[in-house]
Image (cartoon, rainbow, N blue to C red):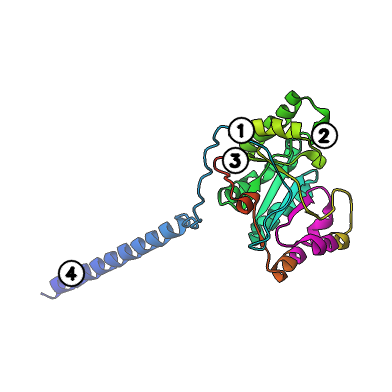
Amino acid sequence: MEPQLDRRRLLGMLALGLAGMLASYSATRDTTARAAAPAAAPIRPRVSPLPPVLPPRPGPSQVVHQGPIAGRRIALTVDDGTSAEVVAGYVAFAQRVGVHLTFSPNGAYNRQWAPHAGVLRPLVAAGQVQIINHTFTHRDLRALAPAGIRDELERNDEWVIDTFGTTTRPYYRPPYGRHSPAIDDVAAGLGYTRTVLWNGSFSDSEVITPEFLLSQAQKYLRPGVINLGHANHPAVLGVFDQIMDLIHSRDLAPVTLDEMFATSRATGAG
């Protein structure tokens, strides 16, 4: 009987060893699988899609150069875009602090603007950023025939739609602020029923110092102001936070032109 007992004991020990090995292999396999599995993608906020671009809605022309004082709103508008560095700075400014801006770029500066389309499209969809028409090549419209005026505006709007997914209607800003009733009528026939000028400026169409730019901000940033800035020269790059401090200290609310005048980015209607 003793050899049979030893044999049974040996078989039991072998069975226990095999079970332990299988358990160890299973645990190792699970750990390896978990390590090899890709990490879960971060949850990103949903952004409303851009509305479809509807046909133009011609109408009578209206020149606007200031907004209502009630509500302490201001419109920060940014023209041109000759400097890639300054365009990038303004885009980062909008993305970082959530300030509402209205850009009026020229398609001739596509190289400076197009790299930021991926950032700007969601901001446009959210209503934080608006893009208006400033013509494709920034020519003085007074020197052009009606066909040339239409080409400048239509070409720029097509570029904005292709790049940023939104129409520039119903706003256009004539280069240099130079326009006439005849020019405005041509624009209004294309759906640009609002000719946008300004009543405040950073005065940065030429090279200036940051200190001078801030002095202009101190002078002009008041309720109802449509402020003109440019994405052309670097003076503004180091003073974005000071500009926001000034806006907050005066309890001002930066808004887009659509927000200031209750117009519609979705329909391009004014």
> Secondary structure beneath disc 1?
loop
Which mark is on residue 166? 3
Check disc 2 and report the residue beneath it.
140
Q: Which residues are magenta?
A: 214-243
Near mark 3 (Cα within 10 A), the count class, few <14, some 14-19 or many ≥20, is many
Where is the N terminus found, in terms of image quarters?
bottom left
Near mark 2 (Cα within 10 A), the count class, few <14, some 14-19 or many ≥20, is some
Q: Is residue 232 magenta?
A: yes
Q: Quadrant of residue 214?
A: bottom right
- Any part of residue 249 in sight: yes
Query: Image height check: is 234 above or below 145?
Result: below
**Nearest to N terminus: mark 1 or mark 2:** 1
**Nearest to N terminus: mark 4 or mark 2:** 4
Q: Residue 150, how many percent across, how many down? A: 71, 28
Near mark 4 (Cα within 10 A), the count class, few <14, some 14-19 or many ≥20, is few
Which mark is on residue 58? 1
> Secondary structure beneath disc 3?
loop
Q: Is residue 93 magenta?
A: no
